[in-house]
Image (cartoon, rainbow, N blue to C red):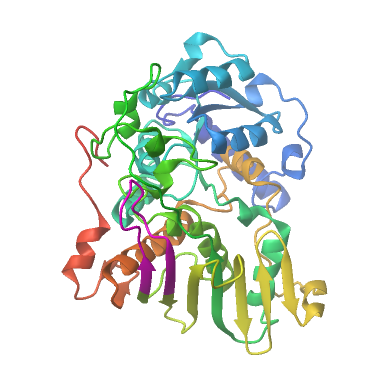
Amino acid sequence: MRRSRTGHGAFSRRAFLRRTTAAAASAVAFPYLVRPSAVGLCGAAPASERITVGLIGTGGRMRAINGGLAGCKDAQRIAVCDVHDASRERMRLALKLSPADSYPDLRALIARDDIDAVAIATPDHWHVPAAIAAAKAGKDIYCEKPLSNTISEGRALVEAVRRHDMVFQHGTQLHSLWEVKHACELVRNGRIGELKAIRIGSPPGRATGIHPPQPVPEGFDYDQWLGPAPWAPYTPARVGHNPGLPGWYFVSDYSLSGWIAGYGVHDIDIAHWGMDTQRTGPVRIEGRGVFPTDGLWDTVLTYDLEFTYANGVKLIMTDTGKNLHGVRFEGTEGWVFTRSRTKAQPASLLRETFGPNETHLQASPGHVRNFIDCVKSRAETITPAEVAHRATSTALLGGIAVKLARPLRWDPQRERFLGDDDANDMLSYTMRSPWRV
């Protein structure tokens, strides 16, 4: 489904979709047409109905996204980008693309007029620069978590998505699970009584030793990989899998709050959904953490965090050495625990259904499927940019709190700390030239 790069003009795809969607909604009294794909009937689609997608980053997370796209016959993957030649070539061959559809520089892929949407699965420090460039070029965006590396750049991305009228999906895939939705509906409909606290257990960070510099391997554009991050000597432990996870997850130059944001944003996203605080944030944060004393990886290892919200609910987040991995909502009449599985007390809560006048949260046919459907309908995805930013910014606030090790007061409307210049200095950082947001 091709369109002009800007998406503007009388005959743009986006304008056409708005007109036809509005007409259908008026005729049948529904917010938008329910396509066969939206109910899982992903049959072959004619070329004129396909959403063309460019893949930015070809590592483990992109392989998962690519699997979701493969199940959507109305999505056509037409270009790949990665600074690792070998990884990019494997993805190109798997998709049976020509060498001309393979790019080491994301800017070249984003500049293509025939791409409707991009999927971004880069290291964290690249998420916002890549996504803003895509928004400016008129591309809809699926972006892996966490949304941003700092709170200020996350806000800049939200504004860019809004200004350019793009569809955005955040890679917090648990949001598309029925079990998570049901647990949050139990909380929102008062089945556990008045919500008092939420407890999160999320995996701890990791440490490693000293890793001396090594020559940059052939076929790897290391300077482009660093991008907006400070220059640093190459070593495999900085960029590779060591084992199972890339080292950059645990280096503050690329993941400022470490695993609190890199993994914990999934759980904070669930907590916000159940608490109905998806478009705001806490008002007070307090935290303590243990950091590596030496070695390349320098982000927090174990942590204890307490976020207080304006509604009085406390969100207590620790590493999994102290709390079970997942999200537990605690009320005056019971509790419900969820992640990929759900438990409750009393257990009968899991059989609860909800009446027509109760809260029914948005259902998703699958995270990637939801994105493709929304690209077509122009509806808001299940995890849009503002929701992504609020979950990520809460995680980043936790990272700041454990570094400063003192109570912090936060204004979620202005997105500033109250009376703390040192903390406010940590809301942004200077990117390496020529990169900027």
**From where the camera sits, is residue 359 visible?**
no
Q: In the rendered image of this protein, does residue 167 appear above or below residue 80?
A: below
**Residue 342 quadrant:** bottom right
Which residue is more in the foreground, 116 or 390?
390
Residue in the image at 55% along x and 33% along y = 16
Residue 26 percent location from the top left of the image: 65, 49
The reply, left or right, for residue 109 in relation to residue 349 is left
Q: In the rendered image of this protein, does residue 45 appear above or below residue 205?
A: above
Name the image quarter holding the C terminus.
Answer: top left
Residue pushed farthest bottom? 332
Residue pushed farthest top? 99
Residue 121 percent location from the top left of the image: 49, 37
The reply, left or right, for residue 27 in relation to residue 21 is right
Q: In the rendered image of this protein, does residue 272 appear above or below residue 38?
A: below
Name the image quarter holding the N terminus.
Answer: top right
Q: Is residue 61 magenta?
A: no
Residue 409 percent location from the top left of the image: 29, 76
Residue 135 percent location from the top left of the image: 40, 37
* First to last magenta residue range: 287-305
Residue in the image at 39% along x and 41% along y = 164
**From where the camera sits, is residue 110 visible?**
yes
Which residue is more in the foreground, 210 or 47?
210
Residue pushed farthest left? 421
The reply, left or right, for residue 96 in relation to residue 391 is right
The reply, left or right, for residue 377 in relation to residue 317 is right
Residue in the image at 40% along x and 20% along y = 104
Which residue is more in the foreground, 367 or 90?
90
Residue in the image at 36% along x and 52% along y = 154
